[in-house]
Image: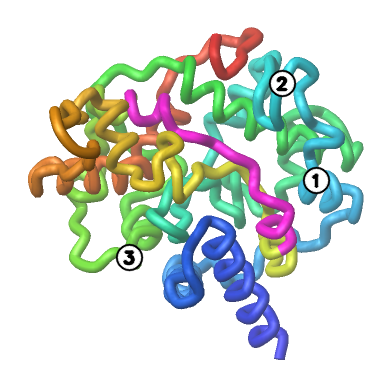
């Protein structure tokens, strides 16, 4: 009975997220079914070791704006924050998966965002506190930290090993895409990842968000931790089609026609390139947090 209830909660949450993102009823049903299949494939329906959370922690995560918003921010997620060596150390432990909703996007692993299932205990060790409310706020802070690290951290193009996840984790996260190859996912033959300027430019443009209240409820209901994630619908900007924003970021957007409306119709070669780059954001983001350079200091999204 519990498994059936858990499935229904997860399906309803995936359906609601898709509808709120603009999908019609039937597309939302398809997306929800696909999301539940991916959960089974990558083990997201297995119990999390630490499922007992104090209610004040859940309250903060469901509605973090009232307690965690940055003082000078124009919206939740905007503003300046002092990033310390403790934040950077935890950033290095981040473990990413893939949100299969809409076009898909990287997300922190809701079972073990920083590599451990006992999240509050891990946060307590890092920030030397046993105050549950403070630890809940620290977890939300890492949403701010990740967004600013991607904007201001440095990562040189080159080949890098994966540390916090392995090639099999990547393949499992992306198994919902038919006929996808290791090369499509950015995995070299030896399991390392080759990072290009294109990857870094797209990472700088990614929109990192905290889950909505509904999404937090869904995650908490199945024993998962709400955590920072990229927007799976408008990952790189405000256009409905991510290819438009990707082409803009990479400076490959064709000039508008002299007559008639501007309609973006990428060549088959460009469309395939953009699709592969998007899939590769999972390993690119993982490599960035593990190997990128970010000095302690005060950072905003803009500077």
**Mark earlier in primary sequence (2, 3):** 2
Which span of residues is magenta-colored?
201-217
Real-space Cα separation, disc 3 to disc 1, in angstroms: 32 Å
**Mark earlier in primary sequence (3, 1):** 1
Residue drawn at (34%, 35%) of the image: 245
Is 1 in front, or is 160? 1
Is 185 in front, or is 73? 73
Is 1 in front, or is 276? 276
**Mark earlier in primary sequence (1, 2):** 1
Residue drawn at (13%, 28%) of the image: 258
User: Do tag 1 and tag 2 residues touch (Cβ < 8 Å)?
Assistant: no
Q: Residue 71: name its quadrant.
A: top right
Which residue in the structure is indicated by mark 2?
A: 73
Q: Where is residue 289 in the image (x, y as percent from the top left)?
A: 47, 30
- Is 99 on the left-hand or right-hand side of 134? left
Q: How crowded is mark 2: few (under 14 residues within 10 Å), some or many (20 or more)?
A: some
Residue drawn at (17%, 44%) of the image: 265
User: How is the structure coloured here?
Assistant: rainbow
Q: 288 above or below 191?
A: above
Q: Residue 204: name its quadrant.
A: top left
Using the rendered image of the protein, determine whether residue 136 is visible from the camera's viewpoint.
yes
Looking at the rendered structure, the secondary structure element under dot 3 is loop
Q: 19 above or below 134?
A: below
């Amino acid at each position: 009975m519990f498994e059936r209830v858990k499935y229904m909660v997860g399906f309803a949450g995936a359906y609601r997220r898709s509808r709120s993102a603009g999908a019609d009823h039937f597309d939302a049903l398809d997306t929800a079914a696909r999301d539940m299949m991916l959960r089974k494939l990558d083990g997201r329906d297995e119990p999390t070791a630490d499922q007992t959370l104090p209610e004040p922690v859940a309250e903060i995560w469901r509605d973090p704006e009232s307690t965690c918003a940055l003082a000078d921010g124009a919206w939740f997620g905007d503003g300046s924050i002092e990033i310390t060596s403790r934040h950077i150390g935890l950033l290095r432990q981040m473990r990413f998966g893939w949100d299969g909703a809409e076009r898909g996007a990287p997300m922190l692993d809701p079972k073990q965002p920083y590599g451990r299932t006992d999240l509050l205990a891990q946060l307590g060790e890092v920030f030397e506190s046993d105050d549950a409310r403070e630890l809940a706020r620290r977890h939300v802070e890492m949403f701010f930290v990740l967004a600013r690290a991607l904007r201001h951290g440095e990562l040189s193009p080159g080949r890098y090993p994966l540390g916090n996840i392995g090639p099999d984790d990547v393949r499992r996260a992306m198994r919902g895409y038919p006929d996808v190859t290791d090369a499509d996912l950015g995995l070299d033959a030896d399991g390392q990842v080759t990072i290009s300027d294109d990857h870094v430019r797209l990472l700088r443009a990614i929109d990192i968000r905290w889950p909505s209240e509904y999404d937090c409820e869904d995650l908490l209901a199945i024993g998962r931790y709400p955590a920072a994630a990229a927007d799976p619908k408008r990952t790189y900007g405000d256009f409905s089609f991510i290819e438009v924003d990707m082409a803009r970021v990479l400076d490959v957007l064709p000039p508008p026609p002299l007559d008639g409306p501007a309609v973006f119709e990428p060549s088959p070669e460009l469309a395939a390139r953009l699709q592969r780059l998007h899939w590769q954001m999972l390993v690119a983001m993982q490599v960035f947090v593990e190997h990128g350079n970010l000095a302690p200091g005060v950072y905003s999204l803009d500077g």
